[in-house]
Amino acid sequence: MKIIVCIKQVPDTTNVKINPETNTLVREGVESIINPFDMYAIEEAVRLKEKYEGTVTALSMGPPQVESALRESVSLGVDEIYLLSDRAFAGADTLATAYTLAAGINNLEGADVVLMGKQAIDGDTGQVGPGVAENLGLPHITDVRKIEEIDGNGYMTVQRLLEDGYVRLKVKLPAVLTVVKEINEPRMPSLKGKMRAKSKEMKVWTAADLDIDKERIGLSGSPTWVTKIFTPPKPKGGKIFQGETRDTVSELLDELVKGGIPIKRGGGK
């Protein structure tokens, strides 16, 4: 079985910087981590490899510093790592990103299963997974909480998380899946894995290495643009009520009435 897991390196949420000229995230020189949801995708990919035999390839798009994230994935059980890195890819929105990742997957001659986290914590759109699938012309299932089995006929049965439960779905492979954190518990890197990660060869592809329409990549190929970024102003006024006494409750109700909110007071105990 051939498995590709798409991962993204994201800024640590405590250290986010914005380029004031392009309104895009500054990634160079910023403390970064593997997108947390992608950690679950890596774990699930390795589990599929262990259960059904095969290989796991991690693919990412970004600046050279993404190498550290790809090497970390090797320490977790990934076999091969590829980085799509070119200034032409910079500033891509979700549509351009999905198109570029799909081109990378095609360069790898596809896979039986493509896995990724349900969304990235720096954008929270959840659009890249379905976008990759559409560019590849493959079926996709989002928010997968469990992979039940892959049968002998090439069908995979999964559980897709819903707000009030889950639905069981069957999909013909190859397919693209995005996973949620309920799917597994990511393993810790082993010492052997860390040693292997240090020496693992990472292949880097630029736009010239891909069969790609250069009008559809990067900032210029993105139909959506961030035109303004600002910090919402702190609300003015307001009052904090503390305590659990009847007087505190009465004071709160009086304040609500002053604000024009109709309150019906009860007379019982």
Image (spheres, grey):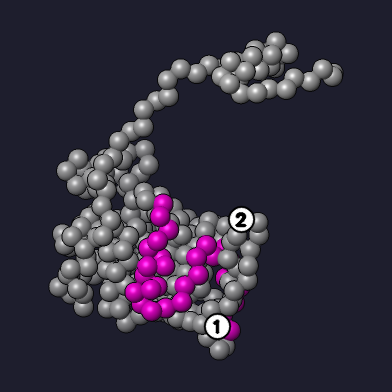
Please report whichever mark, 1 or 2, sits nearer to the chain's N-terminal start.
Answer: 1
Q: Is residue 129 magenta?
A: yes
Type of amino acid at the residue the image marks with label 1: Tyr
What residue did someone put label 1 on?
A: 155
Q: Quick check: can you spot residue 139?
A: yes
> In the rendered image, which quarter contains the N terminus?
bottom left
Residue 226 percent location from the top left of the image: 27, 48
Residue 112 percent location from the top left of the image: 44, 80
- Residue 266's place in the image compared with 110, above or below, is above
Type of amino acid at the residue the image marks with label 2: Glu
Q: Are marks 1 and 2 in contact (CB under 8 Å)?
A: no
Residue at 21%, 78% (x, y): give it: 211
Judge by depth and name the residue closer to the eye, 222 or 6: 222
Q: Is residue 150 magenta?
A: yes
Judge by depth and name the residue closer to the eye, 57 or 221: 221
Residue at 60%, 60% (x, y): give it: 162
For label 2, count other residues whose C-alpha is less than 10 Å away and answer few (under 14), some (14-19) or many (20+): few
Region of the chain picked out in magenta, as a range:
124-151
Query: Is 181 positioned to the left or the right of 101 in the image?
Result: right
Choose top left, top right, bottom left or bottom right for residue 190.
bottom left
Residue 159 percent location from the top left of the image: 60, 68
- Residue 96's place in the image compared with 230, above or below, is below
What residue did someone put label 2 on?
A: 163
Q: Tell us which disc is closer to us: 1 or 2.
A: 2
- Residue 247's place in the image compared with 202, above or below, is above
In the image, farthest residue toward the bottom: 153
Query: Is 129 positioned to the left or the right of 263 in the image?
Result: left
